[in-house]
Image (spheres, helix red, strand yellow):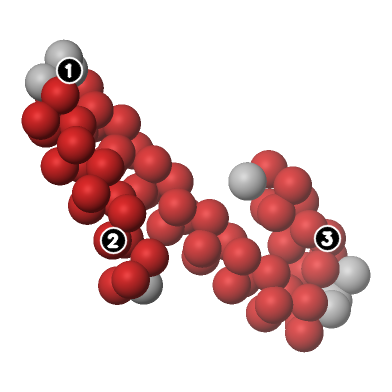
Amino acid sequence: TGLINKLFDLSREIGDNAAEIFMQWFVTEQVEEEKHATQILEQLKMIKPDSAALLMLDKALGKRGDND
């Protein structure tokens, strides 16, 4: 995330509008992925040792790419 932000800032600093727009896509994707990772961690904290719930989460995560 830090490196993506630095590249975005550099493109803005040097006035490379095309690169700034291109990097904005990466920034947006990174924010989404961090949100998803946080949600997954919260779900893992809730299910703890319940193996059935872990299998359900695994199945849901396996389908995640199908909906994107």
What secondary structure is found at the residue carrying circle 1? Answer: loop
Percent coordinates x, y for residue 54 in the rendering: 19, 31
**Relative image position of residue 30 (x, y in whole percent):** 53, 55
Secondary element under disc 3, as helix, strand or loop, is helix
Q: Which residue is mark 3?
A: 10
Asked if residue 6 is positioned above or below residue 58 in the image, the reply reads below
The foreground one among 11 and 67 is 67
Q: Is residue 8 left or right of residue 26?
A: right
Q: Secondary structure at mark 2?
A: helix
Please name the residue shown 77% across and 82% down the image. Answer: 17
Q: Quadrant of the C terminus?
A: bottom left
Q: Find disc 1 in the rendering and name its residue.
A: 48
Residue type marked 3: Leu
Label 3 vs label 1: CA separation? 43 Å
Q: Amino acid at mark 2?
A: Lys
Relative to 5, residue 50 above or below: above
Please tell me in which quadrant of the rendered image residue 10 appears: bottom right
Residue 53 located left or right of residue 63 = left
Residue 46 visible to an observer of this rendering: no
Give the percent coordinates (x, y) of residue 1. 63, 46
Q: CA distance from mark 3 to mark 2?
A: 37 Å
Residue beneath label 2, please?
Answer: 63
Q: Amino acid at mark 1?
A: Lys
Mark 2 vs mark 1: which is more N-terminal? Answer: 1
Please give the name of the residue rendered at 32% of the width and 54% of the height, measured from the top-left corner: 62
> Which residue is depicted at the point 89% across and 70% down?
14
Q: Nearer the viewer, mark 3 or mark 1?
A: 1
Ranked by sequence position, the earlier of labels 3 and 1 is 3
Q: Are marks 2 and 1 in contact (CB under 8 Å)?
A: no
Query: What residue is at 10 percent from the left and 30 percent from the top?
Result: 52
